[in-house]
Amino acid sequence: MPKNQQADDLGPVDRSILDLLAQDARMPNSAIAAAVGVAPSTCLSRIRSLRERGVIRGFRAELDPAALGLGIQAMISVRLHSHRRDQVDRFVREVPRLPGVVELFHVSGADDYLLRVAVRDSDALRDFVLDHLTTHPAVQHTETSLIFGHIRGRLLPPD
């Protein structure tokens, strides 16, 4: 089933389940079932179906970077020299494994990738850019923006 069709196949109960899980992924099945008005067994089978269809990709803990000693977060725009498949593949394979990389986005526009990093301090941020990005053979240009705050929204299917 095409991914864009999956949102159309979500009924009101599935949407309510997703909304509750987006608020608290640790919510017990019995509480979700009661909140959406279905039996716990029905709720469990719907959640299982949402996972099998790829609508729910996983459940994760949201960690506080500052509590882990990572006081600075930044978004780093990266422009590649070329879009040769071997260079792009190497970049995409190596960069997410670098210490401090939280997320890697492939974007459109003047830049090719956007990295979200969390590091100890400004010296560690400078070292990350100089040691890992500017020396990477695929990288032509980087531009760093500090993150002063982060507010997470909820991803829900359109009505």
Image (tube, rainbow, N blue to C red):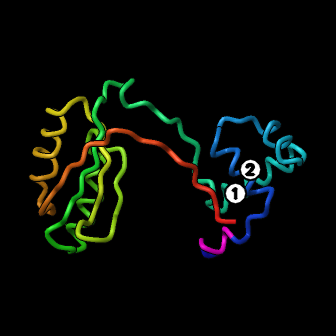
Residue appearing at x 26%, y 34% in the figure: 119
Q: Would residue 35 appear left or right of 89 to someone viewing this image? A: right
Which SS type dominates the magenta stretch? helix
Q: Nearer the viewer, residue 88 or 80?
A: 80
Say if the magenta span includes residue 5.
Answer: yes
Q: Is residue 93 left or right of residue 19?
A: left
| Callout 1 crowding tier (Cα within 10 Å): few <14, some 14–19, many ≥20 | some
User: x, y percentage for residue 77?
Assistant: 24, 57
Choose top left, top right, bottom left or bottom right for residue 27: top right
Foreground: 49 or 27?
27
Residue 48: say if magenta: no
Q: Mark 1 points at which residue?
A: 50
Q: Which mark is first along the chain, 2 or 1?
A: 2
Residue located 12% across and 63% down the image: 140
Mark 2: few, some, or many residues within 10 Å (few <14, many ≥20)?
some
Q: Which amino acid does label 1 sit on?
A: Leu
User: Is disc 1 in contact with disc 2, using a CB cutoff of under 8 Å?
Assistant: yes
Q: Dot 1 lies on which element?
A: helix
**Stretch in magenta:** 3-7
